[in-house]
Amino acid sequence: MKTIASVGECMIELSEAGQGLMRRGFGGDTLNTAVYLRRELAPAEARVAYVTGLGDDPYSDELLAGWQAEGVDTSEVARLQGRLPGLYAIRTDANGERSFAYWRSEAAARSVFAGSEGSARLERLGNYDLVYFSGISLAILPAADRDRLLVRLAALRDGGRQIAFDPNFRPRLWPDLDEARATMTRAAGLATIVLPSFADEQTLFGDSEPEATLDRLHALGALEVIVKDGEAPMHFRVDGESFEALPVRVADPVDTTGAGDS
């Protein structure tokens, strides 16, 4: 059985329900990926764990129960006394595209690798065959904890583990572009699999075309690179070979949230 850990943050989601009312749910890029993997893979094929932090409040209890109902392993979810999960509100336009407002500066997930318990959790990442994380996973962490995570992931790759990274660049989470570029480059350089969006890479690195993204990330050491580009073909480079594939078209999208995480 393959063991997979997805590292990151899930937040409470508020969406418009009409007449000034809001509907409550939950979401987050790395949680979406964990759930998609759990739904796609038979229980006998893989164990999928989510690595994050929650508080000890009723909303955190609801999040945990929701993940467990999906079959996600929550044994590495830190429950931090007096803390709360992050929160975001969403607006959806006529094309199904969303805009977001966030309240996450004190979210429990920021402390998932803090202190002695966090250090032990970092060590236990070595229990997994594949560790998945994103640029958001990195952006929310204090700088020291971010560095410790990247050092641990580099050691895991050197030890033969698979490391999958989705840059998922969110400008407002970074103090400046230089820090974002440096961190993303470091993370991509220790990953075996990189799953960028071309739009993000164009914004952050000035890539002129998806092939330029493939070249840059492959040169950093990634064995597999998959560049997502909305409705345009996805660009792959696997073991030095490049090819393209068309995404499945949706005639009338209701909501594009999580499309890139799948």
Image (tube, helix red, strand yellow):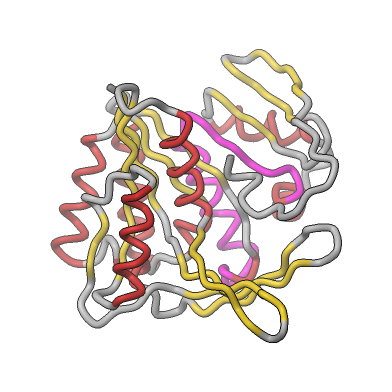
Residue at point 34% right, 35% down? 4
- From this view, report whether residue 7 is shown above or below residue 232: below
> Residue furthest toward the front?
19
Magenta-colored stretch includes residue 189 = yes
In the picture provided, is 144 more to the left or to the right than 231? left
Looking at the rendering, the stretch of residues picked out in magenta corresponds to: 173-199
Depth check: give the residue in front, 227 or 15: 15
The N terminus: image quadrant: top left
Residue at point 31% right, 59% down? 65
- From this view, report whether residue 37 is shown above or below residue 235: below
In the picture provided, is 76 more to the left or to the right than 212? left
Magenta-colored stretch includes residue 95 = no
- From this view, report whether residue 214 is shown above or below residue 240: below
Q: Position of residue 41 (x, y in %)?
A: 42, 27
Count how many numbered circles sit on residues in the image: 0
Residue at point 19% right, 56% down? 119
Name the quadrant containing residue 110: bottom left
Q: Position of residue 111 (x, y in %)?
A: 30, 68
The C terminus: image quadrant: top right
Q: Mostly what secondary structure, the magenta segment?
A: helix
Depth check: give the residue in front, 95 or 19: 19
Q: Position of residue 22 (x, y in %)?
A: 60, 79
In the picture provided, is 21 more to the left or to the right than 164? right
Name the quadrant containing residue 141: bottom left
Depth check: give the residue in front, 42 or 18: 18
Residue at point 70% right, 51% down? 200
Q: Position of residue 222 (x, y in %)?
A: 53, 29
